[in-house]
Image (cartoon, helix red, strand yellow):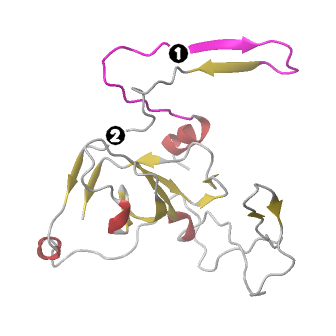
Amino acid sequence: MPEDLRAMMGTRALYFQADSNQRPQVGVESVDGAAQHVWRINVPVSDELRGARPGRTMERHPATKFLAEVSEGASFTSYRPAWADALPVPRLMLERNVRTFRRFNGRRVRPLWVYDSARHAFQDSSWPLGLVGRIFNSQGFSGTGSLIGDRLVVTAGHMVPWGDAQWWMRFVPAYSNGTSLFGAGVESYVSDAQG
């Protein structure tokens, strides 16, 4: 695994966008009374601080523009990082995972039966399944995205927050149960969107 991905797995970056150039006062303090040494990081959150890395450019083009830019010698083989394991058949989870549902009163319930008994959950970070992930955007929506190049993600057009002046999109590869199977810090923000 490359060093930059190892570093990403070991750190968690927080982005805050503010209306002024005043540096926010971040406090780090020790929490007493813990068996292990625990640190608490205090970040002031106000209406002017928004927590995401903003996108730079967003452009819409007709499909003919993209088709005209495809060269004759373009390779359409899929991208596989050199460090990623290749597995053509996904690994099944050994334990069947039955979802719990939340009632209107907030109580969680577990269904007594599942209609389709052939359903299985996959948790596989190997190529190609590990390239599929979740995209979150500044409008509060999330959807599926897939890494198709070294730094290129494809997703549905409605996932791009068209028309927003301050926008962001975050891609989490191999997304499962709220985090990436590669590690908690493995995620990336979209800098430029074209569609």
Q: Secondary structure at mark 2?
A: loop
First to last magenta residue range = 12-37
**Could you say where residue 8 lies in the image, as x and y percent from the top left?**
53, 40
Q: Would residue 22 appear left or right of 118 to someone viewing this image?
A: left
Kindly identify the residue that appears in the image at 81 percent across and 12 percent down: 32
**Where residue 54 is drawn, which disc sits there?**
2
Three-letter code for the amino acid on which mark 2 is drawn = Pro
The overriding secondary structure of the stretch rendered in magenta is loop
**Where residue 74 is drawn, which disc sits there?**
none
**Could you say where residue 65 lies in the image, as x and y percent from the top left?**
12, 71
Place residue 107 in its image quadrant. Answer: bottom right
Answer yes or no: is residue 171 visible.
yes
Measured in 3D between alpha carbons, the distance from the residue under mark 2 to the one under mark 1, in whole angstroms, is 20 Å
Q: Secondary structure at mark 1?
A: loop
Residue bearing mark 1: 26
Quadrant that contains the C terminus: bottom left
Three-letter code for the amino acid on which mark 1 is drawn = Val
